[in-house]
Amino acid sequence: MTNQDIIDLNTRYLCNTYARFPVAFVRGEGCRLWDAEGKEYLDLFASLAVMNLGQCHPAVVRAVQDQVSTLTHISNLHHTVPQARLAELLCNHSFGDKVFFCNSGAEANEASIKLARKYGVDKRDGRYEILTVLGSFHGRTMATIAATGQEKVRQGFGPVLDGFRYVAYDDLEAMEAAVSDKTVAILVEPILGEGGVVVPRPGYLKGLRDICDRHDLLLIADEVQVGIGRTGTLFAYEHAGIEPDIMPLAKALGGGIPVGAMVARADIAESLNLGTHGSTFGGNAVACAAGVAVIDTLLNGGVLENCQKMGAYFLTRLQDLQAKFSCITEVRGQGLILGAALDRDGADIVNACLDQGLLINCAAGTVLRFIPPLIITQAEIDQGVAILENVLAQQ
Ligand SMILES: Cc1ncc(COP(=O)(O)O)c(C=O)c1O
């Protein structure tokens, strides 16, 4: 099949919910992808911050193959080894004591929202309101579009779930002023991903922690995009020297196999008691075995160190481009979530890069986003920057 054959089939049979690029991939290895006609691409997108170990990482492939041929799926009415192992790893390497497994970032946020509300009923006199920030993104389910600080995701889906209010990002005074006698939690991304790779000022997360402590609120850090090594530490909150109370995870957790998780402190997690939440596939054995391989490789395979080193290098290369091209107004990011803000829409640049075999995307319309696999090499970054430079020179 050609690229076009595959695109035609998809167009015929799939709901038209995604603005897709005109390419169909059939194979991947590390930071390389090949389309249906054999053209090679350099991947600085990691399938939307999912493939942190790159395509077909041997540790993930081995874990999945072993697990799928031993025990594929067991319902949550019984116990399995991979679920226990992944939960133990997540708790041993984070603030958390308890994990609820699901299948996606939206579901991990749903679980967090349900937990915050139930905790409000159990321990905070029925408080239910969750403060989130403008420009945030938390998913596409009914609760998570209500939590998301972008009006466009709610349009056409009313009435929207009540109990969320939106506050300016990186504004501690506004957050403090927004706390009401109904507020139970603050939900925030440590770096806005879909919102355009917006890094708050140092001290923002610590300031949110202080507000939560002063008003007895829960701090929920949505690490769906920036967790699992993306910023150079296993979790992004570690940079701020604070601990959240609840943390939704997904994306890179399963190395490309769908798995989400909500991590929480034990005294809070106890509110999600028997029969209050569930998911048929949550914690699937193959997905959790993949997750164990991912966390193990991140921690013991030098991947976090590579992310820090390559992130710093990539940032300097983007700063060089900024000095050359006035259309780049700012470069920013942490580890290997980097953005180049433009004075224009970025779609033409992204499309031209694709033509030249480079995969990037654009967040919030005008920010070129670079979220490559964390195993990327300096030579691959140089190759990507050379293509981008070529494209920018032709704009
Ligand atoms: C911060 C954040 N939270 C939640 C989500 C939703 O994740 P999913 O698409 O797996 O439901 C995303 C997806 O981009 C995200 O970036």
Image (cartoon, rainbow, N blue to C red):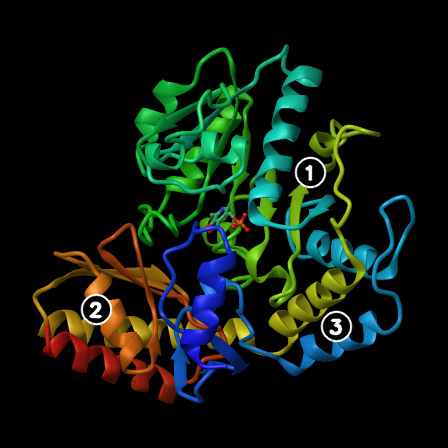
Q: Disc 3 marks which residue? A: 64
> Residue 116, which numbered label?
none
Q: In screen coordinates, is 334 left or right of 71?
A: left
Under mark 1, the amino acid is Arg
Mark 1 is surrounded, within 10 Å at the Cα level, by few (under 14), some (14 to 19) or many (20 or more) other residues, namely: some
* Residue at image location 72% in from the left, 45% down from the top: 99
Mark 2 is surrounded, within 10 Å at the Cα level, by few (under 14), some (14 to 19) or many (20 or more) other residues, namely: some
* The furthest residue to the left: 326
* Residue at image location 43% in from the left, 35% down from the top: 148
Local secondary structure at mark 2: helix
Mark 3 is surrounded, within 10 Å at the Cα level, by few (under 14), some (14 to 19) or many (20 or more) other residues, namely: many
Q: In screen coordinates, is 221 left or right of 153?
A: right
Task: Pinpoint residue 39: horizontal percent, then vertical percent.
Answer: 40, 87
Image quarter for residue 170?
Answer: top left
* Residue at image location 33% in from the left, 82% down from the top: 357
Task: Pinpoint residue 334: horizontal percent, then vertical percent.
Answer: 38, 61
Figure quadrant of the C terminus? bottom left
- In the image, residue 298 sits, relative to residue 37, either above or below, namely above
Q: CA distance from mark 2 to mark 3?
A: 37 Å
Local secondary structure at mark 1: loop
> Residue 349, which numbered label?
2
- In the image, residue 188 sits, relative to residue 373, either above or below, namely above
Q: Tell me, yes or no, whether the two marked residues, 2 and 3, touch with CB atoms within 8 Å.
A: no
Q: Tell me, yes or no, whether the two marked residues, 3 and 1, touch with CB atoms within 8 Å.
A: no
Q: CA distance from mark 1 to mark 2?
A: 44 Å
Under mark 3, the amino acid is Val
Which is more N-terminal, label 3 or label 2? 3
Which is more N-terminal, label 1 or label 3? 3
Can residue 4 be seen in the rendering of this structure? Answer: yes
Q: CA distance from mark 3 to mark 1?
A: 29 Å
Q: Disc 1 marks which residue? A: 265
